[in-house]
Amino acid sequence: MWEEKDNTLYKKFSFGDFSKAFAFMTRVALAAEKMDHHPKWTNVYNQVEIWLSTHDAGDVVTEKDKKLAKTIDSLAG
C-alpha cells in the first residue's frame, strides 16, 4: 500500500533478484514517460523505493501521482 509521507506517495517494492527489480523499473519508466510524469526512485539489489509528487503543483501529491501509483502497482504484478 502507498503511504502519504512528506508531501509524496511512497512505496517500497521487493523482488526475487536484481534482474526482476530492474525489469520492473524499465516497465515503470516506459509507463511514466507516456504519462510525462517521472518518479523519484532508488534501487539496491532487489529493492525499489519510489516517491511520487507533482513538481508543477509545488511538490505535492495530486491525482497525477495517484494515477501513476495505480499503474505502478499493476506493473509490479
Image (tube, rainbow, N blue to C red):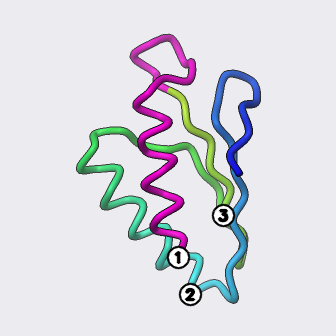
Residue at mark 2: 19
Question: Left or right: 62 with respect to 11?
Answer: left
Q: Is residue 8 found inside the magenta-colored segment of the image?
A: no
All told, the count of numbered labels is 3
From the top left corner, tell me how far across and down residue 19 is, in percent.
56, 87
Kind of residue sitting beneath label 3: Val
Q: Main secondary structure of the magenta part?
A: helix
What segment is highlighted magenta in the picture?
A: 54-77
From the top left corner, tell me how far across and down residue 61 is, in percent.
56, 24
The numbered dot on residue 48 is 3
The 10 Å Cα crowd at callout 3, few under 14, some 14 to 19, many 20 or more, is some
Mark 1–mark 3 Cα distance, whole angstroms, equals 9 Å
Kind of residue sitting beneath label 2: Ser
| Helix, strand or loop status at disc 3 | strand
Please, is residue 35 above or below residue 58 in the view?
Answer: below
Tell me which label, 1 or 3, sits earlier in the chain: 1
Snapshot quadrant of residue 40: top right
